[in-house]
Image (cartoon, helix red, strand yellow):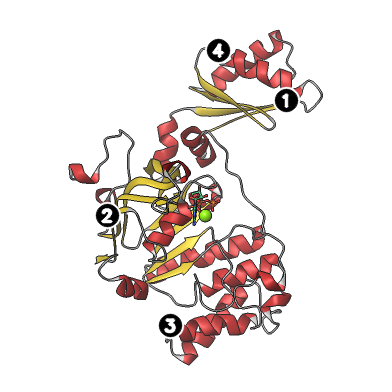
Amino acid sequence: MSAALRPTSAIPLPDATTSSARPVIEVRDLVKVFGAGRGSGADSAVRAVDGITFSVGAGEFFGFLGPNGSGKTTTMKILTTLLGRTSGSVSVSGLDLDRDPSEIRKKIGYAGQSIGVDGDLTGRENLTLMGHLYHLPGALVRERVQELLEVLQLTDAADRPAYTYSGGMRRRLDLGSGLVHRPPILFLDEPTTGLDPQTRNAVWEYLRRLHRDEGLTVFLTTQYMEEADQLCERLAIIDHGKLVAAGTPAELKAEIGADIVTIRLPQDEQFDARRSRAVDVVKGVAGVEGASVFDQGVTVRAHNGGATLVEILRVLEREKIPVKEVAVSPPTLDQVFLQHTGREMRVEEVKPMNRTGFRRGGRQ
Ligand SMILES: Nc1ncnc2c1ncn2[C@@H]1O[C@H](COP(=O)(O)OP(=O)(O)OP(=O)(O)O)[C@@H](O)[C@H]1O
Ligand SMILES: [Mg+2]
């Protein structure tokens, strides 16, 4: 990799050479500043994307993770030609974003976070419309629409106007709209946020199948670590507009290099005081690499978690801190995320819908 591709930090960035396939998405030093150049002054400008460099290989399932407001959607909108950038270079499918935006649009599909369905049309009509927009043959459109209605569990509601749908149904229809056209590169912005676990599993299965059988390249943002772990071959974590980690899920977990001891404390009136004391004392135990609080107690990173656990429990007993439950586990992606961003994932609920909540006309 050339020096120009690699920022000066020691963070392992995703890199075309780590993917066996040729890169189909190449992003170099990408910057997006909102609010600059409108006479609003530099103070009010938001540096939503702050110099990121990465690539995605052909046929790869790539995950882009980050807390709320970290720059995921902004990055995705730039890559899908929906939003201009401040600086940096982007190529998609070997095409330059500035020179060939309309050619890029032919090679990609995009299911965004905002609702892009027409409330006056039925679910089936919305999906069919997407197929026609992409000039797919009629028989193929009918086949895909039926398949998607089934996967997204919308068959029963297929012929009702979409404004009668619940928030979750609307979310599923929106996702379906991005999947009718099966482009070589699919961009999905939090495709399963707000879906119930059963539908989420059906969507995972469907995406896996598309990826496997049709060789689709998928670029997916998610706030569900399990989703990233299950689906993605490679991940990048973005925080405050910068990439803070990247690699395969296994590599990222291995980087933590320690077991995770989870200590849950009784939720009584002394919980807060005991939790603060517990996090302080466990940090002094030999073998403990670090400890942090969470809503139910304390998590500890420890070499040889089983042996360290005995000593941790002894120290807590000495401090008269009662323990409700303990568990030792190998690191999960949640811990990877926490370690790199200092935050746990937060998932926002789908907002209740009303008819005026629908966008009319084209997608954004
Ligand atoms: N049009 C805009 N004008 C000004 N600031 C914006 C605009 N769009 C996004 N931002 C800001 O840019 C930052 C990144 O936003 P972005 O939507 O990319 O985050 P995200 O990672 O997708 O978050 P979420 O997980 O909530 O979807 C945030 O601080 C956001 O407020
Ligand atoms: Mg977003």
Amino acid type, label 2: Ser
SS for callout 4:
loop
In terms of sequence position, does the residue under pointer 3 or pointer 2 come before the other?
Answer: 2
Whole-percent x, y for residue 130 in the image:
50, 81
| Side (left or right) of 292 relative to 256 | right
Amino acid type, label 3: Tyr
Label 4 crowd (10 A; few <14 / some 14-19 / many >=20): some
Label 2 crowd (10 A; few <14 / some 14-19 / many >=20): few
Label 4 and label 2: CA atoms lie apart by 43 Å
Residue to which mark 1 is pinned:
265
In terms of sequence position, does the residue under pointer 1 or pointer 3 come before the other?
Answer: 3
In terms of sequence position, does the residue under pointer 4 or pointer 1 come before the other?
Answer: 1
Label 3 and label 2: CA atoms lie apart by 31 Å
Label 2 and label 1: CA atoms lie apart by 46 Å
| Residue at horizontal 41 percent and vertical 62 percent from the top | 83
Is residue 231 at least partly visible in the picture?
A: no
Whole-percent x, y for residue 161 in the image:
69, 82
Label 4 and label 1: CA atoms lie apart by 18 Å
Is residue 69 at least partly visible in the picture?
A: yes
Residue to which mark 2 is pinned:
20
89 versus 281 height, above or below: below
| Side (left or right) of 207 relative to 57 | right
